Image (cartoon, rainbow, N blue to C red):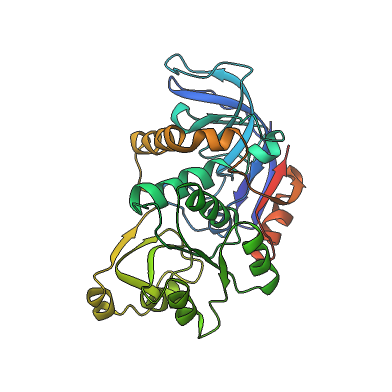
Amino acid sequence: MKAVVITGDGLEVRELPVPEPGANEVLVRVAACGLNRADLIMAAGKPHGALGGADTVAGLEWAGEVAAVGAEVPEFRPGDAVMCSGAGGYAEYAVTDWGRVCPLPRAAEGPVEGATLPIALQTMHDALVTNGRLAAGESVLIQGASPGVGLMAIRIAKLKGAGTVLATSRDAGRRARLTEFGADLALDPSDPAWVEQAREATGGKGVDLTIDQVTGALANQTMQAAAVLGRIVNVGRLGGFTAEFDFDLHALKRIDYVGVTFRTRTVEEVRAINAAMRADIWEAVEDGTLRLPVDRTFPLEQAAEAQAHMRANAHFGKIVLTV
């Protein structure tokens, strides 16, 4: 099979054997695979938890048709149209644990759209509902909202009855599209006035729940925008992995600051996250309420070009490789 592997010089298309599914695994004939920020980290030679390193097949989510299943897989069968998260998705075939697999939604316009959904759905349901404890009527801020996971956060927050939903982007064109996508107010985090604008939008109270994909130098401003007893869920670190942190402000506002990542989750934990998402919001996935725009597609052989497009931060929604 053709697969895109990580090398010391970037990405390279190679011929590899088709993987064999284990007892609890599903083998999928891949039709499309979605790009994620973690793909860029691994392509740059850095690990993503236990993943990464030379000769690793890139890609963390994909969609296609089940080719084979292990003896202990309880739900899926050959021929099923599915979408998955896992590892090794930039390939003609990929294998993953059955608990990371979902049926392709009825409303999805084929595997390209299906490949946009698994990580966004799992990550943002876990961040907003499980860790963020979102209650109907609460205000929500999505820091770094124009990538696919951020857009899904807007959609899920609205679905779960959030009050005011704020979203940030540094690009004026993308901010306009954030309001079209469902945000009540789009803010520019490079504008020093954004914190006060967030407070005004929440009636002076501050934001109840922030889903932060930026962190870095914005960490203290994000706490300034938060309400007393607000919650901040640190999902991503697009703005940097380290920065100054105002511990007194954190204590003063009694902020519940939670870090989340899939890198240290066990197989059982990821199964539980995917199952909780499906139990809670799957109807909205099936009917197309929760869907994402496709920014651009590239053929598998152009994976390096696709990653360069993501690295340029010019996309709105998901970038997808077609196989």
Residue in the foreground of this view, choosing between 96 and 235: 235
Q: Is residue 119 visible?
A: yes
Using the rendered view, name the quadrant where residue 163 is placed.
bottom left
Residue at position x 58%, y 52% in the image = 36
* On-image quarter of the N terminus: top right
- Does residue 262 show up? no
- Nearer the observer, 253 or 250: 253
Residue 51 in picture, x, y percent from top left = 47, 47
| Lateral position of residue 22 relative to residue 112, left or right | left
Q: Is residue 122 above or below residue 184?
A: above
Residue 183, by quadrant, is: bottom right
Name above or below for residue 153 compared with residue 88.
below
Query: On the rendered structure, is 302 left or right of 28?
Result: right
Percent coordinates x, y for residue 303 in the rendering: 70, 50
- Total labels: the figure holds 0
Work out whether 293 lies above or below 223. Answer: above
Q: Nearer the viewer, residue 297 or 121?
A: 121
Q: Position of residue 136 (x, y in %)?
A: 39, 52
- Residue 18, image quadrant: top right
Question: Residue 206: x and y, percent?
Answer: 38, 72
Which quadrant is the C terminus positioned in? top right
Residue found at the far top of this picture: 71
